[in-house]
Image (tube, rainbow, N blue to C red):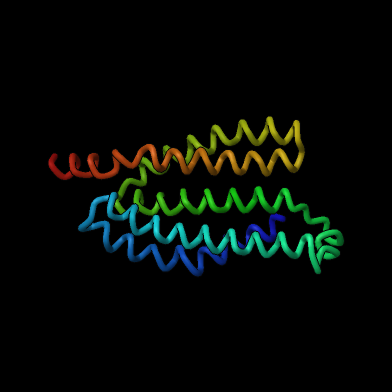
Amino acid sequence: HILLAAFLYQIFNIVSFNRVLPVVFGKAKNENSKKLKVYIHNEFNKVIFVTISLLMAVIFLYYGPLDFIFEKYEIMLEILILLSISFIVRVGADFNALIYNAKGREDMLLKIQLTAFGLGSIFFVVLTINLGILGTTIAGVVTSFIYYLLTILNYKYVDSVILSKIKT
């Protein structure tokens, strides 16, 4: 399960993230975060589409011609679905994080990441103790959502704080 999720994330880094990164950093000098969000949102939609398409293909294979492979390697569909959800949400958070980095707000991003890590750790401990590997996977989804939501909720401060730093 972890191997499949790791491959998916590496493919994302190669195909999407590394292509988007220079564009966002280039545009960040002249555009506010709202315009950058539109660009990132479009790219994020592509990642969602590809991930869901791959997941649908896996589900077809799981219930179809290659079901024996899933049994042989003890691959649980529930875990793959949860890892895919976690992947999608984490990609959204990482795209949002690009704007923080491009705007020079690594300080805000660090606080967001530490908060997500702290809260997520609680979920990891509690859910893993109670549900085992399924709990660990659920905690990964929850932690990704926390990180994603925090990046969204703090957007309003990215440009305003930068502008106040320039004025002083």
In the picture, residue 21 is in which quadrant?
bottom left
Q: Residue at x 67, y 65 (%)?
A: 57
Seen from the viewer's position, the closer of residues 65 and 127 is 65
Quadrant assignment for the C terminus? top left
Q: Residue at x 49, y 69 (%)?
A: 15
Q: Position of residue 88 (x, y in %)?
A: 54, 53
Q: How many marks?
A: 0
Q: Position of residue 93 (x, y in %)?
A: 46, 48
**For residue 9, side relative to residue 125 (left or right):** left
**For residue 53, side relative to residue 102 (left or right):** right
Quadrant assignment for the N terminus? bottom right
In the picture, residue 69 is in which quadrant?
bottom right
Q: Residue at x 60, y 35 (%)?
A: 121
Q: Position of residue 153 (x, y in %)?
A: 38, 37
Q: Up-down: is 47 above or below 112?
A: below
In the picture, residue 167 is in which quadrant?
top left
Seen from the viewer's position, the closer of residues 61 and 112 is 61
Q: Residue at x 36, y 40 (%)?
A: 108
Q: Up-down: is 72 above or below 158?
A: below
